Amino acid sequence: MRLRQRPVKKARIEIIPMIDTIFFLLVFFMISTLSMAQYGGLPVNLPKAASGNQAPAESAAVTIQPDGTVAIDKQPVARGQVGAVLQERLTKNPALLVLINADEKVEHGVVVEIMDAARQAGVAKMAIAVKPKDTRQ
């Protein structure tokens, strides 16, 4: 009895599973980098607004806590020293944007005081941070 010899099959590299794996890794790294976004301020409850833009990379985050304490880029600063600190930062970057992160419970007068100190320090660009307003109804 004679056995038939099967034809020898060439070894192949299956590319479809490799593409799936690479796509999965791409999505994983894209999502993981979203959590690495830098935020220069302390956590506060921001007021909501219907319009707003992203802050540029060269900005100083001035955070005002509900109790009135102030921090610039997470470093606590006395209210009377805000102007001096911002003036020092302006010497390094004249186009500095000051982003005010005031908790929604902070008194209006405190925010105006900080804005006035920034203006006296020579700050030309200032913005107030807000949360996007939920427009769904």
Image (spheres, rainbow, N blue to C red):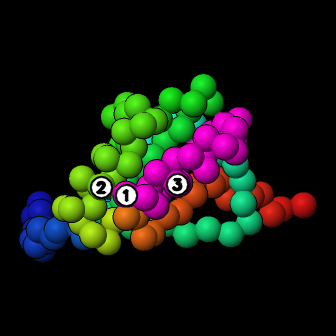
Q: Is residue 19 left or right of residue 2?
A: right
Q: Are marks 2 and 1 in contact (CB under 8 Å)?
A: yes
Q: Say which label, 1 or 3, has the lower sequence index.
A: 3
92 relative to 124, above or below: above
Report which quarter residue 128 is drawn in: bottom right
The three-letter amino acid code for the residue at tag 2 is Gln
Q: Secondary structure at mark 1?
A: helix
Q: Which mark is residue 121?
A: 1
Q: Say which label, 2 or 3, has the lower sequence index.
A: 2
108 relative to 14, above or below: above
Q: Is residue 82 left or right of residue 69?
A: left
Which residue corresponds to mark 3? 116
Residue positioned most to the right: 137
Q: Are marks 2 and 3 in contact (CB under 8 Å)?
A: no
Q: Residue sitting at 37 percent across and 64 percent down?
A: 122
The 10 Å Cα crowd at callout 2, few under 14, some 14 to 19, many 20 or more, is many
**Residue 126 x/y as whole percent:** 49, 64
The three-letter amino acid code for the residue at tag 3 is Asp
Q: Secondary structure at mark 3?
A: helix
Pick whichever, 8 or 64, lies toward us. 64
Q: Residue sitting at 62 percent across and 68 percent down?
A: 52
Q: Say which label, 2 or 1, has the lower sequence index.
A: 2
Q: Secondary structure at mark 2?
A: helix
- Label the magenta part by its dominant secondary structure: helix
Which residue corresponds to mark 2? 87
Magenta-highlighted residues: 99-121
**Residue 39 x/y as whole percent:** 41, 48
Q: Residue sitting at 52 percent across and 47 percent down?
A: 114
84 relative to 93, above or below: above
The three-letter amino acid code for the residue at tag 1 is Ala
Q: Is residue 110 left or right of residue 89?
A: right
> Which quadrant is the N terminus positioned in?
bottom left
